Image: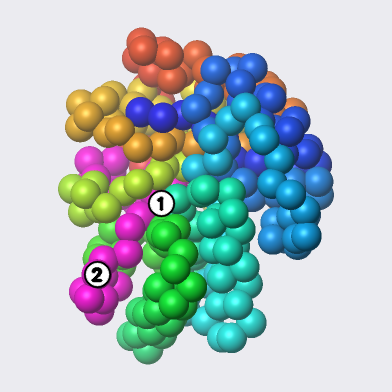
Amino acid sequence: MLFGFSTLGCPSTSLHEAADMAQRYGLDFLELRSLQNTCNLPGLFEGKPIPEIPANIRLLASSLHLTEGGDEAIGSFLEFAELAGRLGVPYVRVFGDTSFGEPLRDDALHQAAATIGICRAELSNRRLSCRMLLETHGNFSSGSVCLALNRLLPEPIEILWDAHHTCYSAGEFIQETWQSLGPLIRHIHYKDSSHNSPETGTRSYTAPGKGDYPTGQLFQHLRAENYREGVSLEWEKLWHPELPPLEVALEAFARIVSPHGANDSQGSSMV
């Protein structure tokens, strides 16, 4: 496996600072979501030379929502794809929709498929080699919805597996999601959390291995399946500024992803 982190956890840092942090913790890659207090990464790099950094960049996280599409949103995605070409980044993340818990309409699913078709055609026209990854998020948190979308496509869209969303938003066991999507998974978001209240079902993020997400089961399963792609720590400090600094989470993450570290981080339940 390859290990890295999303700059969602250090939104004010520069690219050099984030790369130095990845090197300091012995990680393999960066995932870029925010730098220097902006998520507009194409604008941040516009007209500037690409800096040399001591870390690979594996993924750029765009905000395209496939069910909404539209020229402006697709244009923004293509700016991320152009930047991926400049940086040598293989993947650009997209979302399905913005909803959690609302029924997904058939017309929305067809709109998502149409948006993918437009984006793929433009990537081909511009000779851009990066690939779209659909994050398991919102109504697309479940493996069954992702598969339903792929049945509408001539070539399936590959998956960014947010293993927290499939567990707590879709109620899927780790093995269940893997059985549905395993061959398509190219990148994984890992984070941990604990119940605020069993009655309300609300959760708060915790340092890796400190909550009740089944951390040990996830990493043991990935090793058993000989997973060779990326696992990215997603520390959501941009959205939750009350969280401790990213370094606190990286210390715990580094212990977990050591060859035997995940064995001590089982978590209390699957869902």
Residue 1's label in the rendered image is: none
Say which element carries label 2. loop
Report the front residue among 50 and 255: 50
Q: Mark 2 points at which residue?
A: 155
Q: In this view, does 187 lie to the left or right of 14?
A: left
Q: Which amino acid does label 1 sit on?
A: Leu
Q: What residue type is labelled 2?
A: Glu
Q: In this view, does 178 lie to the left or right of 24?
A: left
**Dot placed on the residue nearer the N-terminal end, 2 or 1:** 2
Q: Nearer the viewer, mark 2 or mark 1?
A: 2
Say which element carries label 1. strand
Report the front residue among 234 and 264: 234
Q: Name the residue under label 1.
A: 160
Look at the picture and state if 239 lies above or below 195: below
At 39% across and 48% down in the image, what residue appears?
A: 161
Q: For marks 2 and 1, give the CA distance.
A: 16 Å
At 58% across and 63% down in the image, what residue appears?
A: 82
| Residue 221 seen by the camera | no
Q: In which quarter of the image is the C terminus?
A: top left
What percent of the width, then of the height, locates residue 117? 37, 80
Look at the picture and state if 134 lies above or below 107: above
Tell me where the magenta segment starts and ends, as one range.
149-178
